[in-house]
Image (spheres, rainbow, N blue to C red):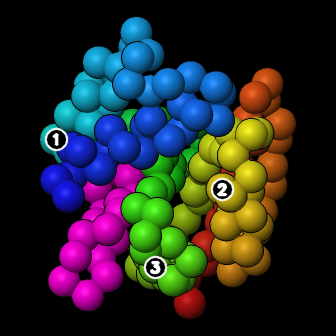
Amino acid sequence: MRRKDMYLQYKCEMCAFDGVDGLTDPLWWTYLADYDLFTSHKDAEWIPIIDGKDEVGFMVVLKGELTKGHGVDYFIWDTYTVPSHRRKGLMKKAVIDYMSKHPGKYGLVMMDKNTPSHLFWEATIGEFDEVRSWVWPGCHLFIVRKEEE
């Protein structure tokens, strides 16, 4: 699957948590703008999730000027694995590997209605050295720290 198609599939799945059809969302064009930013900005890193020889997901990490003033070194902005490759531990391994190579303070946001995301991050954040969270309307913000090993 092409990366842009995978990103659009991800955004459509996220829209469903708010009861919106991502394909008819009048703001669908913003998804493409996000994709363009995440794949071209010097401080946005698109990390492919690989299963065998196939790219089956991605993690988008923001850093540098894209996190300036937010109290974090990195922001895990989006994570996605295509449905047929979920529950294999691919994303958890990618997150822990990335954070082990790049120690610091990380931010991440989860939509309240995205129960699978909550379960994933609850199982994953136990690997970190510090966890703080806040509730915003409709979502949760987590700040986690991974120390150098």
Seen in the picture, residue 108 relative to 26 is either above or below; the reply is below
Query: In this figure, which residue is indicated by the disc labeled 3?
Result: 90
Label 3 crowd bin: few (<14), some (14–19), many (20+), radius 10 Å? some
Neighbor class of circle 2 (other Cα within 10 Å; few <14, some 14-19, many 20+) is some
Pick whichever, 12 or 109, lies toward us.
12
Farthest top residue? 26
Q: Is residue 30 above or below residue 129?
A: above
Residue 55 falls within the magenta-colored stretch: yes
Quadrant where the image shows the N terminus: bottom left
- Judge from the rendering whether residue 42 lies leftward or rightward of residue 90; answer left or right: left
Horizontal arrangement in the rendering, residue 134 relative to residue 49 (left or right): right
Instruction: Look at the image and give the residue range highlighted in magenta.
Output: 42-61
Mark 1 → mark 3, Cα distance in angstroms: 24 Å
The local secondary structure at tag 1 comes to helix
Residue type (three-letter) at the residue carrying disc 2: Ser
Q: x, y (%) of residue 45?
A: 29, 54
Provide residue 143's location: percent of width, then percent of height: 69, 53
Secondary structure state at the residue bearing disc 2: helix
What's the residue at 45%, 57% (across, down)?
Answer: 80
What residue is pinned by disc 1?
A: 40
Query: According to the image, label 2 marks what residue?
Result: 117
Please identify the dominant SS of the magenta region.
Answer: strand
